[in-house]
Image: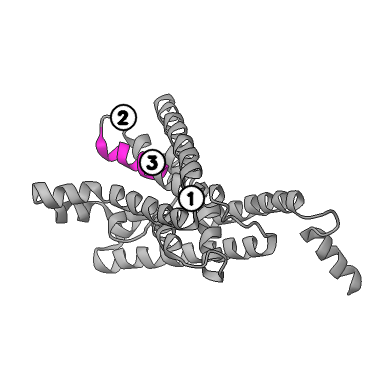
């Protein structure tokens, strides 16, 4: 695991340098929006790079696609975050309802999924080597996605608001569960129950870690919501004047009732 941690630390240094460069050079709204759609597009192309290589040069693209289910359907949260980051980049009004929902989802939900994908990468855990391009691609793709979502606060588009943040994260958690159920059902219907079990979209069927069998999506969601409640409360305490924080509003409503 030391190799994985060191590799990810190097990636974080590169991400930091790229973020500083983006903040320095992308000063106009047009430049910021251009970076916000180019960055996720690069991530998507990198995500599909092996498939494109096999499709164009080896003639085994379809076989590779069959062996890599997350290229067919968004079976993991980071797959959904990746596409939503692209949709967010193309939204014209960054303070509109859709853009705010996407920014909340991409940033807050993406932080957890990308960091887990980098520092607890399942592919690396199964085969701990950086000599396999597929493993390196898996880790680096999460790193490029992390760069994508960190552009949102760097460009000043992150707008913390306790109730909106919490509502959107709750909707995101429910949405991920629905997507996971759909993906598992598709693989079960089209291939078989064993295929659905192996795909295990959103970790709904079983835990990704044998030592933690209870750590499936429902429990992960509860832990995540509790963690986000703490994070959003901290943001609210920092941003809101004393007496106007969410718990003050709740207490005031209870006193009036």
Q: Name which residue lies at 51% across and 62% down.
A: 102
Work out whether mark 2 precedes mark 1 in sequence or the reverse, and give the earlier one: 2
Q: Is residue 14 above or below residue 164?
A: above
Q: Which residue is mark 2?
A: 129
Q: Name which residue lies at 60% across and 51% down.
A: 223
**Dot 1 lies on which element?**
helix
In this orientation, which residue lies closer to the viewer: 31 or 10? 31
Viewport quadrant of the N terminus: top left
Circles 1 and 3 in contact, beta carbons < 8 Å: no
Q: Name which residue lies at 44% across and 49% down.
A: 148
In this orientation, which residue lies closer to the viewer: 72 or 212? 72
Image side of residue 141 versus residue 9, left or right: left
Image side of residue 241 versus residue 62, left or right: right
Characterize the local packing of mark 1: few (<14), some (14-19) or many (20 or more) Cα atoms within 10 angstroms. Answer: many
Give the x, y percent position of residue 138. Answer: 34, 42
Q: Which residue is mark 1?
A: 149
Viewport quadrant of the C terminus: bottom right
Q: Decide whether residue 133 is among the magenta residues.
A: yes
In this orientation, which residue lies closer to the viewer: 53 or 187? 53
Characterize the local packing of mark 3: few (<14), some (14-19) or many (20 or more) Cα atoms within 10 angstroms. Answer: some
Q: Which residues are magenta?
A: 132-143
Name the residue at the right extreme.
255
Q: CA distance from mark 1 to mark 3?
A: 22 Å
Give the x, y percent position of residue 87. Answer: 42, 63
Name the residue at the front extreme.
28
Q: Which residue is mark 3?
A: 122
Characterize the local packing of mark 2: few (<14), some (14-19) or many (20 or more) Cα atoms within 10 angstroms. Answer: some
- Of the two numbered discs 2 and 1 in the rendering, the one whose residue sits closer to the viewer: 1
Image side of residue 125 versus residue 71, left or right: right
Residue 107 image label: none
Work out whether mark 1 precedes mark 3 in sequence or the reverse, and give the earlier one: 3
């Amino acid at each position: 695991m030391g190799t994985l941690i060191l590799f990810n630390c190097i990636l974080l240094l590169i991400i930091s340098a790229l973020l500083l460069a983006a903040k320095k050079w992308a000063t106009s709204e047009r430049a910021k929006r251009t970076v916000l759609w180019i960055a996720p597009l690069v991530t998507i192309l990198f995500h599909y790079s092996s498939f494109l290589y096999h499709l164009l040069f080896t003639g085994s693209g379809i076989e590779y696609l069959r062996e890599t289910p997350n290229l067919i359907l968004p079976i993991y949260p980071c797959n959904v975050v990746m596409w939503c980051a692209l949709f967010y980049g193309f939204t014209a009004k960054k303070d509109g309802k859709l853009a705010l929902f996407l920014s909340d989802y991409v940033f807050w939900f993406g932080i957890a999924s990308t960091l887990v994908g980098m520092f607890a990468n399942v592919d690396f855990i199964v085969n701990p080597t950086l000599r396999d391009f597929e493993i390196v691609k898996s880790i680096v793709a999460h790193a490029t996605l992390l760069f994508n979502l960190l552009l949102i606060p760097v460009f000043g588009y992150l707008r913390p608001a306790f109730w909106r943040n919490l509502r959107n994260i709750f909707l995101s958690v429910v949405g991920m569960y629905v997507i996971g159920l759909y993906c598992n059902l598709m693989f079960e219907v089209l291939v078989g129950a064993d295929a659905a079990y192996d795909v295990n979209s959103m970790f709904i069927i079983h835990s990704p870690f044998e030592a933690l069998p209870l750590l499936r999506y429902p429990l992960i969601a509860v832990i995540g919501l509790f963690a986000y409640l703490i994070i959003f409360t901290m943001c609210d305490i920092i941003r809101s004047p004393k007496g106007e924080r969410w718990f003050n509003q709740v207490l005031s409503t209870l006193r009036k009732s």
